[in-house]
Image (cartoon, rainbow, N blue to C red):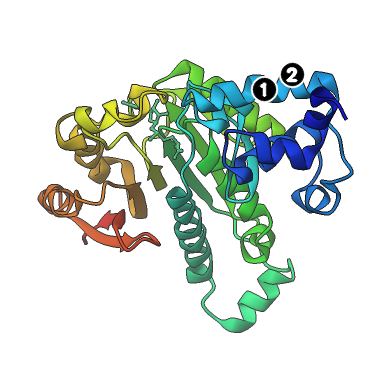
Amino acid sequence: MTERTSLKNISRLINDSHLPSNITEKLICDLLKITPEKLFLDKDKIKLSADNLKKFKQIEKEVLSGIPIQYVLGKCSFHDREFTANDSVLIPRPETEKIIEIATRFIESRITNYLPAAASRQRMQAGELRINTGFNILDIGTGSGNIIISIIKDCSGNPIIHNSKFVIQPFASDISPKALQIAKQNARFHNVENKIKFLKSDLFSNPKLPKKFDLIIANLPYLSPEETKKLPFEPALALNGGKDGLELIAKLIENLPEKLSKNGQAILEIGYKQKNSIIKMATKKNLKTKVLKDLGGYDRYAIFSIDK
Ligand SMILES: C[S@@+](CC[C@H](N)C(=O)[O-])C[C@H]1O[C@@H](n2cnc3c(N)ncnc32)[C@H](O)[C@@H]1O
């Protein structure tokens, strides 16, 4: 066997690659469009064509230079779905996934509040009862659109929310036109482009946004300028939250009493050292705050409502 042919053999390629084997395997699956299970079963049989080998070497070079694999491949995974990603958007992080669960539970609770009796809930699940009220959601700093798209997809798969015909009107905004382009592309890919209104906006500045929202979600930049420098491949606009990472969050909190509807809620992802400062800011604005931890045990999600 010549060196060239031996390199085409997948098992040899995994051994010879300078990347960790799990990353090499992911790249091979992506190149050959096969599942990890197929690769596991057939890695001694499958061979890479010369063309694919060339592509693999190029990708390997880029990953070894430090470029995040998601940017090299142009896609990432979030909440079990695939999203396009490039260097105009933040690579969605696993800790952000919990926001989808918090938001969906809130929407569900709003619906069941309308119909507290178990019998009514059963009728609603069967599609016999429908709620005719609007519910505005705004995802600020939508980036790749990962949060709002996941919420809308999960809501349509949730029998209580789906069958209630609760009219959800989702808005997604970003200050970056390039990020909005990616978000729209992802919405198209997930068949929700006609459901979500995407708008360029600096926080709430776009006059086309409704005056009030029932649910506001924001994973705004929350790193300090020094922390931002440690992530050179992702857009600073998505990471740098100004002094102590808190400048944009402070502006957002300032606006919440005016922008939240009476029983509305705002869910923010925050830096793990920001809890106390954020509670102080929110209390000054008469907002009730609850902080939840991520899976690593860090304070990560601030939930605000209007203190009545
Ligand atoms: C941390 S990223 C979050 C991206 C995505 N929502 C996620 O969770 O993966 C923050 C996003 O906020 C946007 N952004 C920064 N400043 C903003 C502002 N003043 N108003 C609206 N969006 C802003 C950035 O362009 C970026 O897409």
Secondary structure category for the residue under label 1? helix
Q: Type of residue at label 1? A: Lys
Q: Which residue is mark 2?
A: 54
Q: Which residue is mark 1?
A: 57
Q: Position of residue 228 (x, y in %)?
A: 28, 29
Q: 119 and 108: which one is in front? A: 108
Instruction: Identify which residue is drawn at 75% across, 49% down.
Output: 36
Q: Position of residue 218 (x, y in %)?
A: 37, 41
> Dot 2: few (<14), some (14–19), or many (≥20) neighbours within 10 Å?
few
Instruction: Identify which residue is drawn at 50% across, 49% down.
Output: 135
- Quadrant containing the N terminus is top right
Q: Quadrant of residue 230?
A: top left
Q: Position of residue 90 (x, y in %)?
A: 45, 31
**Do labels 2 and 1 touch, CB within 8 Å?**
yes
Q: Type of residue at label 2? A: Lys
In this image, 198 relative to 122: left or right?
A: left
222 versus 214 height, above or below? above
Secondary structure category for the residue under label 2? helix
Residue situated furthest front in the rendering: 1
> Dot 1: few (<14), some (14–19), or many (≥20) neighbours within 10 Å?
few
